[in-house]
Image: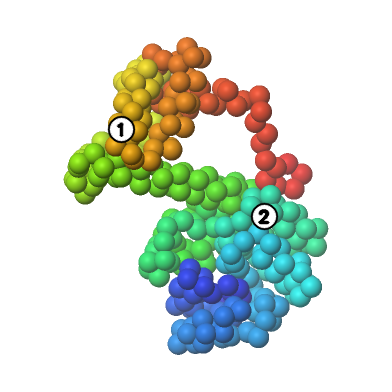
């Protein structure tokens, strides 16, 4: 297939290389001409601008920094919407706002053009190895059209729902990993200031839920199957958080995430959840927010 690839930075460049290695004819564009020149050894042609990279291609892929960049690429003064093939497919693999993804998809659909969103998970080395996790949103037929190319860039391709669902899933994923990073950093500082070897603390936590994660351990065993009988009670979690917060205050360690968690566990206790399993915090927060939940519209007409 003839592929246009726009945005060949840290992640985009190895992704484009893997498509070319798969036997496709790739034309790329990036504002950084050095990155384009570096792709020539993979047989990737450099376009002078985004429109030329996208013109008459079977598939056009973008991998850009933010929502406005993608909107400008498609509908700006020199946007690619006017040169996309009516029989082609536009795939945006950027991490952007789901509402922007839906807006772009709707405007393209009004022109008779198809789009899927396919942001990626994992890191640069996975992009180099073609082992990205790709979260895809779009109509089933369009996702299947995209899959042969996506499979060249990732070893895990997950269809998350209609257009915009891939972007939404990426935001959820990043929220969790980024916020957990704060708790991880604070935990190691608490260990260090408490006189413990941080690497030893890490090894210990790898043997518990702290390092193994709730999604692979407690959640599927308890709250996600509707079992709130306590294995470890919210009351006890709240008590232990109190010990950690007090310990941190005594030794001068930052514990912002711990204090916020303590307050939410306390809210759950006040709501009568204290003797439920600690994973019931999800059930409590879900019930608390239910009246305010507004499901995002992830497809035109939905």
Residue 194 at x, y percent in the picture = 24, 39
Q: Nearer the viewer, mark 1 or mark 2?
A: 1
Q: Which mark is residue 250?
A: 1
Q: Residue at x 38, y 66 (%)?
A: 125
Q: How is the image coloured?
A: rainbow
Above or below — where is 193 with respect to 4?
A: above
Q: Residue at x 73, y 72 (%)?
A: 80
Which type of secondary structure does the marked residue at label 1 adopt? helix
Q: Which mark is residue 101?
A: 2
Numbered circles on residues, count:
2
Counting residues from the N terminus, which is met first, the one under dot 1 or under dot 2?
2
Above or below — where is 47 with respect to 192?
A: below
Q: Which residue is more in the foreground, 142 or 157?
A: 157
Q: Which residue is more in the foreground, 222 or 242?
A: 242
* CA–CA distance in space, label 1 to label 2: 48 Å
Which type of secondary structure does the marked residue at label 2 adopt? helix
Taking 3 as reference, is 280 left or right?
left
Residue 159 at x, y percent in the picture = 54, 50
Taking 195 as reference, is 247 left or right?
right
Q: Quadrant of residue 76?
A: bottom right
Q: Which residue is more in the foreground, 147 or 275?
A: 275
Residue 103 at x, y percent in the picture = 73, 54
Taking 76 as reference, is 96 left or right?
left
Q: Residue at x 38, y 13 (%)?
A: 275
**Camera sees residue 43:** no
Above or below — where is 245 with respect to 272?
A: below
How packed mark 2 is, by other alpha carbons closer than 10 Å (few <14, some 14-19, many 20 or more), is many
Image quarter of the N terminus? bottom right
Residue 109 at x, y percent in the picture = 76, 58
**Camera sees residue 68:** yes
Taking 185 as reference, is 177 left or right?
right
């Amino acid at each position: 297939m003839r592929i246009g690839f726009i945005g060949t930075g840290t992640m985009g460049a190895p992704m484009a290389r893997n498509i070319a290695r798969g036997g496709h004819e790739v034309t790329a564009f990036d504002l950084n001409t050095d990155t384009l020149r570096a792709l020539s050894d993979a047989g990737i042609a450099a376009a002078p601008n985004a429109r030329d990279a996208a013109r008459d291609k079977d598939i056009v892929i973008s991998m850009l920094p933010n929502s406005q960049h993608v909107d400008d690429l498609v509908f700006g003064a020199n946007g690619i919407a006017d040169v996309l093939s009516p029989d082609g497919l536009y795939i945006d693999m950027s991490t952007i706002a789901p509402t922007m993804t839906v807006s772009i998809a709707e405007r393209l659909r009004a022109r008779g053009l198809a789009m899927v969103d396919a942001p990626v998970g994992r890191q640069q080395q996975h992009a180099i190895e073609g082992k990205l996790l790709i979260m895809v949103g779009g109509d089933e037929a369009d996702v299947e059209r995209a899959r042969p190319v996506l499979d060249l860039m990732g070893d895990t391709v997950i269809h998350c729902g209609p257009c915009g669902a891939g972007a939404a899933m990426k935001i959820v994923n990043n929220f969790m990993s980024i916020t957990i990073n704060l708790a991880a950093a604070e935990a190691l500082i608490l260990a260090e200031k408490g006189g413990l070897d941080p690497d030893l603390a890490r090894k210990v936590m790898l043997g518990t839920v702290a390092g193994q994660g709730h999604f692979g351990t407690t959640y599927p065993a308890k709250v996600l199957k509707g079992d709130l009988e306590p294995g470890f009670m919210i009351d006890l979690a709240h008590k232990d958080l109190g010990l950690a917060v007090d310990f941190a205050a005594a030794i001068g360690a930052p514990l912002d995430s711990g204090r916020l968690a303590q307050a939410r566990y306390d809210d759950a206790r006040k709501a009568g959840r204290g003797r439920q399993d600690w994973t019931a915090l999800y059930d409590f927060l879900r019930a608390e927010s239910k009246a305010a939940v507004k499901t995002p519209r992830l497809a035109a007409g939905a």
